[in-house]
Image: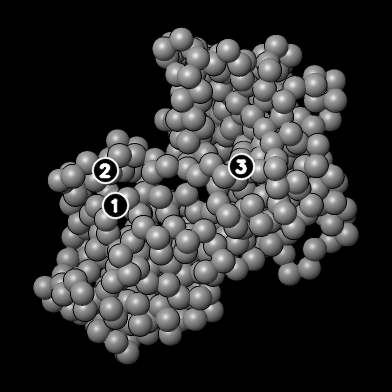
């Protein structure tokens, strides 16, 4: 029996892909006979609950954490520091007793605490590198300041002291190899779809606002890693120069989601705005649209793998991916989706988005089409 401490961010019922997958993997480890403590965050209250799974045990420790303004760098930095320290402190006794400590890329910068601490603890340290930090922060910037470059060098040095990495894709593996991580310490462990989608599951009601259109769904977080400019320009051309048969269902949170909605409504282009649904309704949501939209900026390839890809692939619906073929988004879609239902356009290629939308509209033949704009 292995005593494992598993650290992540927002645990269900809070919305967060990393927490959903962490709970799934922690239960798998407990079912194998391990003694697992899963520690994560809650937006409501501190809590502890326990599950018996076969010969193993899972204890789930939730620590209350306040929400914060992600657009405010100072607030985000202070939140991260408080959250990381509080999470580690909440399971300090379990860390001392553990055989293995597994931590994720969310919340960020846990490595800055755990690697130095492990000089004393001397535990097996596993990093499930869901997102790369500070690389994601650096990718947002036109010019990276010298202090952040130094912080990055320190982070790379800390990574070399991690015993084992779990990566979500081959693109992440390449990023680790680029900074000199021994390939023998890297294991590919993909996320599964967050939900099962049984055959014949009924879809949700389609938004009345989009009646008559083929529906393209963007669901989940729409943040700084996601390319919205290329999609918007291609979408604008589709409605002003093309058939105008496809409409966007923006079922998303994040700063880019607000921006996309603002632009589309200002220009009179069709959009329905919703919010992420509860996990139990996700299978029905995923089978509702005619196709799904995934976007990724080139600077984030290998640093971020949009988790929505797994559910989109399993849904059996088409996928329009706006991003680089170097990302595992493309690898997974190309392998799992029939070519007639998978479309890709490079970031910065709105003409490619336009052609894909025209094809989606042609294939799905909505009952009527409406042309927006002058």
- Front label number (3 vs 2): 3
| Residue at numbered disc 2 | 197
Quarter the N terminus occupies: top right
Residue 80 is situated, as x and y percent measured from the top left of the image, at: 69, 38
Q: Earlier in the sequence, mark 1 or mark 2?
A: 2
Q: Are marks 1 and 2 in contact (CB under 8 Å)?
A: yes
Q: CA distance from mark 1 to mark 3?
A: 27 Å
| Crowd class of label 2 (few under 14; some 14 to 19; many from 20; radius 10 Å) | some
Tell me the SS state at disc 1.
Answer: loop
Q: Is residue 299 above or below residue 234?
A: above
Name the disc covering residue 187, or none.
Answer: 3
The colour scheme used to paint the residues is one colour
Total marks shown come to: 3
Q: According to the image, label 1 marks what residue?
A: 315
Q: Secondary structure at mark 3?
A: strand
In-image side of 202 versus 59 (left or right): left
Percent position of residue 280, x then y: 30, 35
């Amino acid at each position: 029996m292995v005593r494992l401490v598993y650290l992540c961010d927002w645990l269900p019922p809070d919305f967060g892909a990393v927490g959903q997958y962490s709970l799934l993997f922690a239960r798998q480890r407990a079912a194998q006979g391990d003694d697992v403590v899963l520690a994560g965050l809650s937006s409501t209250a501190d809590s502890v609950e326990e599950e018996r799974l076969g010969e193993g045990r899972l204890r789930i420790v939730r620590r209350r954490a306040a929400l914060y303004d992600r657009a405010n760098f100072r607030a985000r930095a202070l939140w991260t520091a408080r959250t990381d320290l509080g999470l580690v402190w909440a399971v300090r006794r379990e860390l001392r007793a553990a055989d293995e400590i597994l931590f994720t890329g969310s919340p960020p910068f846990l490595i800055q605490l755990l690697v130095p601490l492990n000089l004393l603890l001397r535990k097996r340290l596993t990093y499930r590198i869901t997102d790369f930090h500070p690389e994601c922060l650096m990718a947002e910037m036109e010019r990276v300041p010298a202090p952040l470059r130094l912080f990055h060098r320190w982070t790379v040095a800390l990574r070399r002291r991690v015993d084992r990495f779990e990566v979500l894709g081959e693109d992440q593996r390449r990023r680790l190899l680029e900074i000199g991580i021994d390939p023998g310490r890297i294991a590919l462990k993909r996320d599964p779809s967050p939900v099962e989608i049984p055959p014949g599951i009924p879809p949700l009601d389609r938004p009345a606002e989009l009646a008559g259109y083929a529906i393209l769904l963007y669901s989940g977080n729409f943040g700084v890693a996601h390319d919205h400019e290329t999609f918007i320009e291609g979408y604008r051309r589709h409605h002003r120069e093309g058939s105008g048969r496809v409409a966007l269902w923006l079922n998303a949170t994040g700063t880019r989601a607000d921006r996309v909605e603002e632009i589309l409504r200002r220009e009179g282009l069709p959009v329905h705005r919703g919010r992420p649904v509860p996990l139990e309704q996700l299978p029905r949501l995923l089978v509702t649209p005619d196709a799904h939209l995934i976007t990724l900026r080139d600077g984030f390839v290998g640093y971020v793998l949009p988790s929505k890809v797994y559910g989109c692939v399993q849904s059996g619906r088409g996928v329009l991916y706006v991003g680089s073929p170097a990302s595992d988004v493309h690898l997974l879609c190309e392998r799992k989706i029939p070519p007639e239902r998978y479309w890709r356009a490079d970031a910065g290629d709105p003409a490619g988005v336009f052609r894909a939308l025209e094809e989606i509209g042609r294939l799905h033949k909505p009952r009527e089409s409406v042309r927006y704009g002058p």
